[in-house]
Amino acid sequence: MAKRHCLLIGVDQYPNVPGADLKGCANDVALMGSLLIDRFGFPEECCRVLVNDEATQAGIRGALDEVLQAVERNDIVVCFYAGHGSRIAHPRRPGQFLESIVPSDSGRGDQPNRDICDREIDRWVQRLNESTPYVTLLFDCCHSGSVTRDVFGEATREIPADLRSLEQMFEDGDLPEILRDLPAAVESTAETPAGYVSGRRRAVTVAACRAEE
């Protein structure tokens, strides 16, 4: 019988981006967890939850890898992210951008960029699809593409695009492998719409609005 796995990520606190803190993302994670467990029968032991300082770049990547290792043939996977979305300057195409989610330890200005870009997420789904087509991604952030304001209009879940070069954005050793191999990655998805997941993947992606918003 197929197992059910979920990864729930919520970030309200961004210590390396002044004025970027949000409200409600951790609560969104709690509500989503209750929905998946109580209504849809996801086992608690198969639900991975990362909130605020747990949701670092390393923490998110580690959890993504744990899901990959746990998933078996035709299992069901749900990944939910609530927090800031952003963009980083495309290293090979001037004036173009890659979409990204923003972990709690990512920064702007003189702080290292630890965003997780759309190509990395697309590669993760590609690897998941080797085991299962039953993948659902839910992004409550901008550039997923989506942008969401809280109910009182106090904050937009967006951090401005990082226009720095790769050398300026990433510390030594932090540059994702997918960006080092970007020309091949871009070519492989050139015929598909912009967004976190290539149209060639077997996955359902739910976002609040479009990639450019």
Image (cartoon, rainbow, N blue to C red):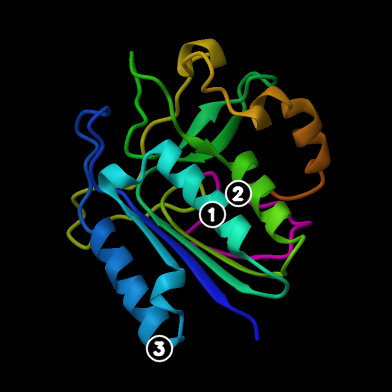
Residue depth check, mark 1 versus mark 3: number of the one nearer the observer: 1
**Nearest the camera: 97 or 50?**
50
Amino acid found under the numbered disc labelled 2: Tyr
Residue 203, percent from left and from top: 67, 65
What kind of residue is marked 1?
Glu
Q: Which residue is mark 2?
A: 196
Q: Which image quarter is the N terminus in?
A: bottom right
Question: Principal SS element in the magenta part?
Answer: loop
* Label at residue 151: none
Q: Is residue 87 above or below residue 146?
A: above
**Residue 186 in the figure: left or right of residue 57:** right
Is 172 magenta? The answer is: no
Front-most of 14 and 8? 8
- Earlier in the chain: of badge 3 and badge 2, it is 3
Residue type for callout 3: Arg
Residue drawn 39% across and 81% down?
37
The image position of residue 59, as x and y in percent, is: 41, 43
In this view, the residue in front, 141 or 10, is: 10
| CB-based contact (under 8 Å), mark 1 and mark 2 | no
Which residue does the numbered mark 3 point to in the structure image? Answer: 39
**What is the span of residues highlighted in magenta in the rendered image?**
194-213
Q: Which mark is residue 66?
A: 1
